[in-house]
Image: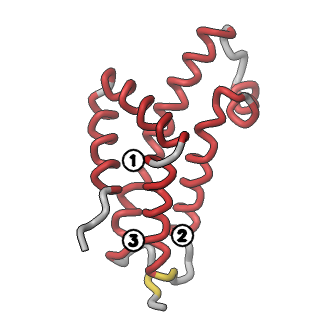
């Protein structure tokens, strides 16, 4: 098993690029989901209520696995200990599965596309995420 520094090793480069794109996309999608929620149920009173909804309400449930996945990336990239190079490959495979091959991935793709039609920055991020998750030819 070969190990490397996640902050600088080329094996982790895609993850280092993917993380901020996912984080910003996640934020945009959370805001869009908040807007849909408020259109249905009325304005959210405060940040505490919003946090509670994000953590507990069914409407936000599809975003939770993405939040958890971003935390997994953070744990690897911010680790002060060398990490197995295979971990980068595993996380990219997990991203492909989560964001493309599951019901959550379908929701992510659908809502990202809708947000991309309204926001050129989201369009560019969506395209770049797809590029980063395209497997390299053998």
Q: Quadrant of residue 34?
A: top right
Task: Specify which label sits upstream in the sequence, 2 or 3.
Answer: 3
Q: How many numbered discs, if any?
A: 3
Q: Quadrant of residue 55?
A: top right
Using the image, tell me which numbered label, if any, was put on residue 12.
3
Element marked by disc 1:
helix
Question: Is residue 65 shown left or right of residue 49?
Answer: left
Q: Position of residue 16 (x, y in %)?
A: 39, 62
Q: Write down the residue under mark 1.
A: 21
User: 6 and 58: which one is in front?
Assistant: 58
- Pointer 1 local density, CA inside 10 Å: few below 14, some 14–19, many at least 20: some
Q: Position of residue 126 (x, y in %)?
A: 33, 40
Cα separation, mark 1 vs mark 2, equals 16 Å
Q: Residue at x 56, y 82 (%)?
A: 81
Circle 1/circle 2 CB separation < 8 Å: no
Q: Residue at x 56, y 16 (%)?
A: 36
Circle 2/circle 3 CB separation < 8 Å: yes
Element marked by disc 2:
helix
Task: Specify which label sits upstream in the sequence, 1 or 3.
Answer: 3
User: 98 and 38: which one is in front?
Assistant: 98
Q: Position of residue 3 (x, y in %)?
A: 46, 87
Q: Residue at x 35, y 63 (%)?
A: 14
- Whether residue 100 is situated above or below residue 52 in the rendered picture: below
């Amino acid at each position: 098993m070969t190990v490397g520094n996640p902050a600088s090793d080329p094996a982790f480069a895609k993850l280092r690029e993917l993380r901020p794109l996912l984080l910003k996309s996640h934020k945009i999608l959370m805001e869009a989901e908040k807007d849909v929620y408020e259109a249905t149920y009325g304005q959210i009173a405060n940040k505490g209520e919003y946090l509670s909804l994000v953590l507990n309400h069914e409407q936000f449930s599809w975003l939770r696995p993405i939040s958890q996945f971003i935390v997994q990336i953070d744990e690897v990239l911010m680790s002060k200990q060398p990490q197995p190079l295979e971990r980068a490959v595993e996380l990219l495979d997990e991203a492909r599965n989560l964001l493309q091959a599951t019901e959550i991935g379908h929701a992510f793709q659908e809502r990202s596309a809708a947000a991309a039609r309204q926001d050129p920055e989201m369009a560019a991020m969506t395209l770049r995420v797809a590029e980063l998750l395209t497997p390299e030819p053998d």
